[in-house]
């Protein structure tokens, strides 16, 4: 299980993730984030929140508008570090996981933004369709879903699966999500060779 890897290596992974800024990692879609952070009481779901880098940035940037972040991290040790990193901010941590997201589903829906950064490659093919259904259900009409896709070998015990932007776009369309951005493959900001990233951004069609 990948969760075991993230728990065992929580401290070193947190250092790695926090070594790069939100702007460096998410530069391709930053202009789509700004209007969400300017919206009063916007609600953001950060799935696979890790050590809290992205949640921290979005909470700080949206603080004047009371933007609320729900951070979901299945690996408990990593989540504990994330809680410390976002202490005092409008970030609420939960232990939950795709495709079911049972806890989130019981508590909340209607998010203005859902972010999956470095998550999709951990979801096997058999769980991708129910996952995209769940994400669409949790998103507000007009809301944005941002998914980063990791291409390349893993080199450790984590389970990763091949990802394809075209496949993801088709899945999204099947549940009323329209692609608004599909980037080219970009080099890894951590400098790791043979690893490339793409970002796919959807908007949920209005009913």
Image (cartoon, rainbow, N blue to C red):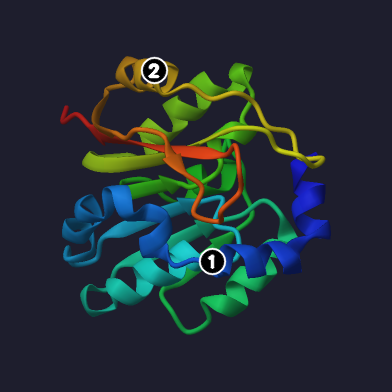
Q: Tell me, for residue 166, which label it has, or none.
A: 2
In primary-sequence order, the first of circles 2 and 1 is: 1
Q: Going by the picture, which residue comes out furthest to the bottom? A: 88
Q: Tell me, for residue 114, which label it has, or none.
A: none
Position of 12 relative to 188 (above/below): below
Question: Which one is nearer the viewer's eye here, 36 or 40?
Answer: 36
| Circle 1 crowding by C-alpha within 10 Å: few under 14, some 14–19, many from 20 | many
Separation of disc 2 and disc 1 at Cα? 29 Å
Residue at 56%, 77% (x, y): give it.
85
Q: Which corner quadrant holds the N terminus?
A: top right
Question: Which one is nearer the viewer's eye here, 113 or 184?
Answer: 184
What is the x, y in percent for residue 94? Answer: 58, 58
What is the x, y in percent for residue 123? Answer: 61, 30
Q: Do the CB atoms of the residues marked 2 and 1 lie less than 8 Å apart? A: no
Residue at 50%, 19% (x, y): give it.
129
| Circle 2 crowding by C-alpha within 10 Å: few under 14, some 14–19, many from 20 | few
Q: Which corner quadrant holds the C terminus?
A: top left
Residue at 74%, 33% (x, y): give it.
159
What is the x, y in percent for residue 156? Answer: 79, 42
**Residue topped by disc 1:** 52
- Quarter of the figure with residue 177: top left
Quick check: can you spot residue 148?
Answer: no
* Mark 1 element type: loop
Quick check: can you spot residue 182?
Answer: yes
């Amino acid at each position: 299980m990948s969760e075991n890897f993230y728990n065992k290596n929580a401290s070193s992974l947190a250092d790695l993730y926090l070594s790069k800024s939100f702007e460096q990692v998410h530069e391709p879609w930053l202009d789509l984030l700004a209007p969400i952070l300017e919206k009063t009481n916007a609600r953001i779901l950060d799935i696979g929140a890790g050590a809290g880098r992205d949640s921290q940035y979005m909470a700080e940037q949206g603080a004047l508008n009371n933007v609320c972040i729900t951070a979901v991290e299945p690996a408990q040790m990593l989540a504990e570090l994330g809680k410390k990193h976002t202490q005092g901010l409008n970030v609420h941590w939960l232990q939950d996981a795709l495709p079911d997201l049972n806890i989130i589903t019981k508590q909340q829906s209607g998010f203005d933004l859902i972010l999956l950064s470095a998550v999709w490659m951990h979801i096997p093919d058999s769980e991708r369709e129910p996952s995209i259904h769940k994400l669409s259900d949790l998103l507000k009409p007009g809301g944005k879903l941002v998914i980063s896709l990791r291409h390349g070998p893993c080199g450790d015990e984590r389970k990763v699966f091949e990802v394809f932007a075209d496949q993801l776009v088709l899945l999204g369309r099947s549940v009323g999500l329209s692609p608004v951005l599909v980037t080219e493959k970009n080099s890894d900001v951590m400098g790791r060779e043979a690893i490339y990233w793409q970002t796919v951004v959807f908007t949920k069609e209005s009913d």
